[in-house]
Image (spheres, coloured by chain):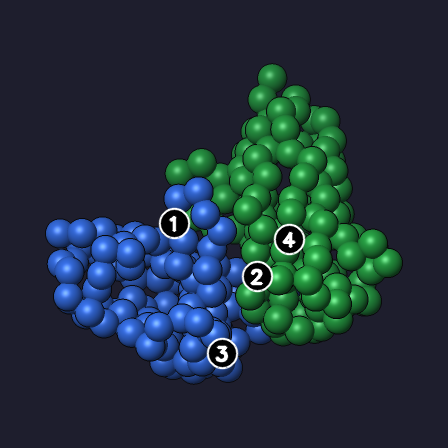
Chain colours: A green, B blue
Amino acid sequence: EVQLVESGGGLVQPGRSLRLSCATSGFTFENFAMNWVRQAPGKGLEWVSGISWNSGRIGYADSVKGRFTISRDNAKSSLYLQMNSLRAEDTAFYFCARGNDYSVVSHSDYWGQGTLVTVTS
Amino acid sequence: IQMTQSPSSLSASIGDRVTITCRASQGISNYLVWFQHKPGKAPKSLIYAASSLQSGVPSKFSGSGSGTYFTLTISSLQPEDFATYYCQQYSDYPHTFGQGTKLDIK
C-alpha cells in the first residue's frame, strides 16, 4: 500500500524557518517525481514545488521561489521542504504528493494527509 | 500557465449531470488532471491525461479536451460527489491549479 506521511509542521514566527518531511512507503521512491501542494485556510489548492526522480529538475511557485527549497533522499524514501523567511501568507496545510512517474510531466496520484504550518507572531 | 475554471460554484440536485470547464492560457496538450477535494481529506485524482479515468474511480466521471479547453462531467450526482473540484496542468513546472469549483446540493 502506498503511504505518504508528512511531518514537521507547527507554529512559527514570521521570518523564521521550518523543515517539512514526507516519509513514504509501499513503492520504489527513487522511480517517481514528487510534489508539495498547499491549501491556505479558505483558499484553493496551490502547487508549491516539485522534483524529478533524480533531483535533475526542480520547480517552484513564484510565491515561494528563493525562500523554499525542495530536496529528496532516495536512500531514505523521503521528501523534504525547507521553508525560510516564512510569512503569514505561508500559513496552510502542506501536502506531499507522488508524481505518477519519474519525470516533471507527471500528475500527482497519491497524497499524504497533510501537515499544518501556521506563521504568526 | 494560468488555469481558469468555471463556474467557481455550482448548485445541483441528486441525480443531475454537471459539467465543469477549465481553460489554459496556453496549449498544454493533454497534460491535465482533475481532482476531487473534501474538507480534511487528501485530494483525490479522478481523471488524468485529460480523459483517462484513474483506477478505482467510477465511470460517472469523465473528462475531455486538449490544448487549452477541458471539461469534467459528473453524471447522476450522489451525496458523496458534493465537494470541490480542481483542474491542474502538469505540462511543465510550475504545475498550476485552477481556482476550484465548489459543488453543493441545491
Q: Considering the numbered disc 4 on the image, is that residue within a helix, a strand or a loop?
A: strand
* Residue positioned 55% across, 46% down in the render: A113
Q: Disc 2 residue type? A: Tyr
Q: Chain of mark 4?
A: A
Asked if disc 4 and disc 3 are in contact, CB closer than 8 Å, the reply is no
Q: CA distance from mark 1 to mark 4?
A: 18 Å
Q: CA distance from mark 2 to mark 4?
A: 8 Å
Q: Nearer the viewer, residue B33 or B42?
A: B42
Residue B99 visible within the image:
no
Q: Considering the numbered disc 3 on the image, is that residue within a helix, a strand or a loop?
A: loop
Say which label, 1 or 3, has the lower sequence index: 1
Do marks 3 and 2 share a chain? no
**Label 4 crowding class (10 Å Cα cut-off): few <14, some 14-19, many 20+?**
many
Residue A47 visible within the image:
yes
Give the residue number, with chain letter if any, for mark 4: A4
Q: CA distance from mark 1 to mark 3?
A: 22 Å
Q: Considering the numbered disc 1 on the image, is that residue within a helix, a strand or a loop?
A: loop
Q: CA distance from mark 3 to mark 2?
A: 16 Å
Asked if disc 1 and disc 3 are in contact, CB closer than 8 Å, the reply is no
* Residue positioned 49% across, 39% down in the render: A40
B36 above or below B27? above
Asked if disc 3 and disc 2 are in contact, CB closer than 8 Å, the reply is no
**Residue B49, disc:** 3
**Label 2 crowding class (10 Å Cα cut-off): few <14, some 14-19, many 20+?**
some
Give the residue number, with chain letter if any, for mark 2: A110
Q: Disc 1 residue type? A: Lys
Give the residue number, with chain letter if any, for mark 1: B38
**Label 1 crowding class (10 Å Cα cut-off): few <14, some 14-19, many 20+?**
some
Do marks 1 and 4 share a chain? no
Q: Position of residue B26 (x, y in %)?
A: 48, 73
**Residue B72, disc:** none
Say which label, 2 or 4, has the lower sequence index: 4
